[in-house]
Amino acid sequence: MTTSKRRIVILGANGNVGTEISLILRHFTQYDLVPVCRSRQGSSYLRYMGVPCAHGAVTDSAQAVSLLAKSTVIANFALAYTPTGSPRELWELNRQIVASVFANAPGEATILHFSTISVYGDGQGRGAFGLKSSYGAAKLSIERTALEHSRKSRKRLYVLRLGHVLGDLQNLSRSITDEIAAARPCIPFPDRASNTTFTATIADAIIKAADDELGAPGVYDLLNVPQLTWNEVYQIHAERAGLPLITSNETKGDRPRWPLSTSVAAIIGAINRHPFIRQQAMKLLAFASPDRNQQIRATHLVEKARSEIRALRPAPQWNQALEWRETGSKFLTSLTPTRALLVDARYRASAVTGVARWPVDVPESG
C-alpha cells in the first residue's frame, strides 16, 4: 500500500517571495510541490529552473477546484494586480482570491494566509505605531476577510504577518549586499531588532504546517527566530557574500534636530537652523555684554564652518526598513531557529540545480 505525498500548493508563485519559496521547497522531495501562476509567462523562470508549475486563476471556481485539489497546505502569497486598477478594485480582487481559496480548498487542508507587519501602522521613527498606510489598512481588511471565511467554513487558517523579507531573490537582501560590496553600509541602529524574515523561516513554517507541527491556528507575527538585530542581518549577508563588513559610524544623530542641550554650541545651532529663533536671539544679544557677544560670534563662525564642511560630504543613507521600531508580540513556538536554517543548503534558492532550459512556450527576447 502506497501513501500519497502531502501536497503543498503555492499561490502567487510568480512573485518574489513565492518564487523563492518554491525554489527552496523543491529540495524537499517528500512533498508534492505545486507552484501556481496565472500564466505560462509568469511561471517561465521557475520552469527554466526545472520547477514544474500549474497555471490558472484561483478566482475562477472551476479552475480553483483543480488547482487546490488534494492539497495538504495552501500557502497564499497571491497579490492582485491590475495595470489601471484603483485601490478599491485591487481590494475586491484580493477579497475574491481569499473567498475562492476557502470555497474550493479541501476540507482537511491547512490555509496559510501571508500578510504583513504593516498592519500595525507606520513602524518608522515618527512616533508610536498606529498610523496605517493604505497598504497596511488593505492588508488588515483582507486578514479579517480570511478569518471570517475560516470561521464560516471551519477550515484551518494561519494568518502569518511577514516582516521585511530577506533571501537570495529579495530586493532588501540585494540592496544590503550591494552596500557591503561598496564598503558603504550605514547601520544607524545596529542593536535594534530588525523585524526581518528570511525566506528560510517562511519555508520552515510551510513545512511545519504540512507535517501538522505548526501549532494552534491563529494570527501570528512570522519574523526570524529569534529576532535578529540589524548588525546581525548585515553580518550574515557579508558572510554569505564572502566580504568584510565595514560600517559607517554616522547615525541618526548626525541629522539636524531640536537641541536638548543648553550648551552655547547647541544654542548657536538652533539659531542657525531656525529663522524665528535667530530673530529673537538677535534682540536678546542687544542686552548682552561685549564679551558674551564675542563668544557667541566666535561659536557661530565655528558652527558655520562645520556646517559648510559637512555639506561637502554626502549625507549618510540607509534603507528605510532600518528605521522601523521593533514589533511583533505573538509568535509560533514550533519553528526552527533561523540561523540553523541558514546553514542548511536546502533553504537556499541559489542552491537549486535545475534544468536551466528556457520554456519552449515562452518567446525569447531579442
Image (tube, rainbow, N blue to C red):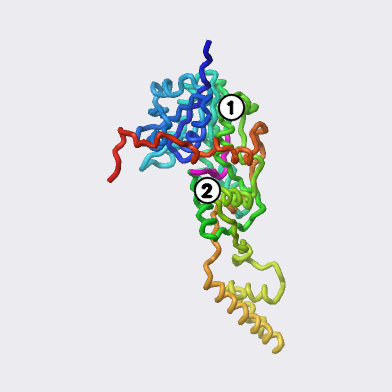
Kind of residue at disc 2: Ser
Residue 209's mark? 1
Q: Residue at x 56, y 36 (%)?
A: 202
Say few, some or many: other residues with alpha carbon within 10 Å of mark 1 (under 14 / 14 to 19 / 20 or more).
many
| Number of numbered callouts drawn | 2
Q: Residue at x 67, y 73 (%)?
A: 266
Kind of residue at disc 1: Ala
173 relative to 82, above or below: below
**Nearer to the camera, 235 or 166:** 235
**Nearer to the camera, 182 or 58:** 182
Question: Mark 2 falls on what kind of element?
Answer: helix
For the record, the magenta segment spans 160-168
Query: Which residue is under mark 2?
Result: 173
Quarter where residue 157 is shown: top right
Quarter where residue 294 is shown: bottom right
Marks 2,1: beta carbons within 8 A: no
| Residue 279 forms part of the magenta stretch | no
